[in-house]
Structure formats: structure tokens, C-alpha cells
Image (cartoon, grey):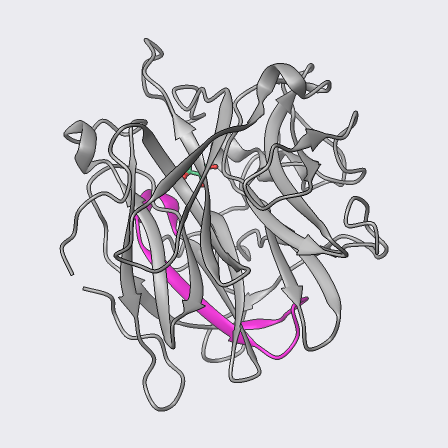
């Protein structure tokens, strides 16, 4: 399979892929040109809308369904529509998305539509109890329960919530302390609120000890994705400043998870963000790099590759 961008008429990133009605839908960020210099807060990722894309199979024609949600139609948000995800339940489609609120604090909102490609109408307020970035919805058809997983450090502000409320001076834990984990909460039947508490997902090493904040090759940074394979929950994520995609497995969405390994080496560009979906009897990794813009970090392009498992259920390194 050629390693070419799936979409080249726009810059796209952070692809969350799902199969709805037998068709693959991709919910990416829509990167845009700007004059904001790169910094560790990610100010250069200054996106203002979402497009939804679809295809009947990997390798088929990719359809751009146009703008599905625009920043100006999100009453509570001020800027930076970052990595979204989507889910279907009870005849409605839900688009989950982070943005900075009017005070500059990242929150997670939800917008509702009748079709997988939108358009989506944003709720007037962010989901109560949310903060930080990168929502991922696990709609667990086996249990009938739906979960929202999210969080990202540095520009994603997760380190500012260590005391339970927003602390503008909040820092990452010291290198020898347990790393911050993504957050998870069970979605209510309305898919727009939580029906349980927000908890932190623990990621353990092979000895059962929490991964440490100084373990930059393995610790959680951003971009969580949760999927199930043969009854096991897989939590995959980006290690951020070391640029790997790695994963951990567990038997409960709330954790704990045990670190299992790396499945994508660094790509062109700083960020790495992905999703994993089954379609046509194969598993697919959707991710992005910055090859389409010649390596400009904030101008990215979505790609897809086949993902395989070993007989023991370990994810093989994707090449
Ligand atoms: O696209 C903006 C941010 O960059 C995302 O929220 C992160 O996951 C990283 O890909």
C-alpha cells in the first residue's frame, strides 16, 4: 500500500475513524496556514472548523462532506478546534471536540447530528466536568456502555488539573513520580453528560508499577484511542515529545492498563495522533504526518496503514 496522504486538497490531522452503515468515516482536525510561530503550547494549531470524510473501503475514493461544524457556531468556544471523535447511539451521531473556552481553558464539547457526516449542532456549554483535549469515545457494544477518554499534557493543559481544578501554574509531576494518565468517564444515555465520576487511567509497567513521568519513551502524552480486540481493551496513545505511538492493554476501560509496546516509529512532523478501526476483515491504523507540507508541524495529512496482531494479541510494529 503506498504511503500517500488520503486527503491532499486540505491539511488534515488527528484522524478518528469509525465504521457507520458499513462505510468508513474519518473525523480529523482541519489544519490551516497561519503566521503563529511553533511553541510548546501548540498555539500554531489554530483550527476553526471540521470536515468529515468517508470512503466505502480503504483504497476507495475519499469523499469530502464539507464543513460539519464551525467555531463560530460553538457558543462557548474561543479558538483551537483540536482533535475530535464521533459516536452513534439511539439514531443520533455525536461529535466530541476540544476547544479553548472564552477564558482560554481547554474544554470538551459535543455536537449532535442526524447523519454521520453532519452537520452537527453544538450544545451551548461544554460537557460538564471536562477539561483538556483529545476526546475519544469508546462505544462498547458488548456492555452497552459508552466511555469518553481524553487528556493531553503541555499545550493540552492536563498538568494544570492535578489539584482537581484549573491551576495556571500546574506542572507535570517530577521525573521520578508516576506520570499523568488520561481521564475517563462513562457517558450518560444522552451521550452529552457523564453518569459516573471522572477518573484517571493508570498505565503500569510489566512489574505492575506506574509508568513514571520521566519515562518519555512510554508515558502518556496525548491522543488516546481505546478499542477492543478479542475481548481485551487496548489503550493506545502518543508519547508526544518522543513521537511514538504505543499501547497498553487491560480488562476494564477505567484501567489499570499494562504497557505493551510501540507500534509506530516517529513520522515527519512533531505530533503523532491516530485511531484504530476494523473494516473488511482487517484492522487499520489511521494517523497523520507532515509530509504534505514538507514537514511543517501544524500542516499535516491523514494516512492509513494496515495494522496486524500477533497470535498473542500484541500489535505488530506498523511499517
Ligand atoms: O491537532 C492539535 C493537537 O495536535 C491534537 O489535539 C494533538 O493530539 C496533536 O495531534
Relative placement, left or right, of 295 versus 182 is: left
Residue at 86% x, 55% y: name it. 195
Relative placement, left or right, of 174 versus 37 is: right
Nearest to the observer: residue 311 or residue 243: 311
Chain part drawn in magenta:
239-257
Q: Quadrant of the N terminus?
A: bottom left
* Residue 240 painted magenta: yes
Residue furthest top as drawn: 35
Relative placement, left or right, of 237 versus 233 is: left
Q: Position of residue 310 (x, y in %)?
A: 32, 85
Q: Position of residue 254 (x, y in %)?
A: 68, 66
Where is 312 relative to 46, above or below?
below
Where is 102 relative to 275, above or below?
above
Q: Quadrant of ligand 1?
A: top left
Evaluate whether residue 272 shows in this view: yes
Where is 306 relative to 156, above or below?
below
Residue at 44% x, 64% y: name it. 277
Nearest to the observer: residue 150 or residue 68: 68
Q: Quadrant of the C terminus?
A: bottom left
Q: Position of residue 176 (x, y in %)?
A: 48, 55
Q: Quadrant of residue 59?
A: bottom left
Q: Position of residue 200 (x, y in %)?
A: 67, 56
Q: Quadrant of residue 98?
A: top right
Residue at 50% x, 38% y: name it. 83
Evaluate whether residue 175 shows in this view: no
* Residue 40 painted magenta: no
Nearest to the observer: residue 267 or residue 66: 66
Where is 188 relative to 270, above or below?
below
Amino acid at each position: 500500500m503506498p504511503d500517500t496522504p488520503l486527503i491532499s486538497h486540505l491539511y488534515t490531522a488527528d484522524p478518528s475513524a469509525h465504521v457507520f452503515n458499513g462505510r468508513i468515516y474519518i473525523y480529523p482536525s482541519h489544519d490551516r496556514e497561519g503566521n503563529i510561530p511553533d511553541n510548546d503550547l501548540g498555539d500554531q494549531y489554530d483550527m476553526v472548523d471540521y470536515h468529515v470524510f468517508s470512503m466505502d473501503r480503504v483504497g476507495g475514493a475519499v469523499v469530502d462532506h464539507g464543513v460539519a461544524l464551525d467555531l463560530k457556531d460553538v457558543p462557548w468556544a474561543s479558538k483551537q478546534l483540536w482533535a475530535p471523535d464521533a459516536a452513534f447511539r439511539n439514531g443520533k451521531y455525536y461529535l466530541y471536540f476540544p476547544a479553548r473556552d472564552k477564558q482560554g481553558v481547554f474544554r470538551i464539547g459535543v455536537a449532535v447530528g442526524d447523519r454521520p457526516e453532519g452537520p452537527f449542532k453544538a450544545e451551548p456549554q461544554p460537557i460538564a466536568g471536562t477539561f483538556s483535549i483529545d476526546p475519544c469515545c469508546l462505544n462498547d457494544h458488548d456492555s452497552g456502555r459508552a466511555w469518553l477518554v481524553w487528556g493531553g499534557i503541555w499545550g493540552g493543559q492536563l498538568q494544570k488539573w492535578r489539584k482537581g481544578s484549573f491551576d495556571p501554574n500546574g506542572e507535570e509531576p517530577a521525573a521520578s513520580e508516576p506520570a499523568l494518565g488520561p481521564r475517563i468517564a462513562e457517558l450518560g444515555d444522552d451521550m452529552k453528560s457523564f453518569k459516573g465520576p471522572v477518573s484517571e487511567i493508570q498505565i503500569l509497567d510489566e512489574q505492575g508499577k506506574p509508568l513514571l513521568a520521566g519515562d518519555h519513551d512510554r508515558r502518556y502524552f496525548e491522543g488516546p484511542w481505546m478499542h477492543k480486540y478479542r475481548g481485551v481493551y487496548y489503550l493506545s496513545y502518543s508519547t508526544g515529545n518522543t513521537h511514538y505511538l504505543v499501547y497498553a492493554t487491560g480488562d476494564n476501560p477505567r484501567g489499570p492498563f499494562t504497557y505493551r509496546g510501540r507500534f509506530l516509529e516517529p513520522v515527519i512532523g512533531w505530533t503523532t495522533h491516530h485511531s484504530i478501526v476494523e473494516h473488511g476483515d482487517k484492522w487499520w491504523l489511521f494517523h497523520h504526518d507532515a509530509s504534505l507540507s514538507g514537514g511543517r508541524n501544524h500542516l499535516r495529512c491523514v494516512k492509513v496503514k494496515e495494522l496486524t496482531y500477533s497470535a498473542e494479541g500484541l500489535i505488530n510494529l506498523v511499517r
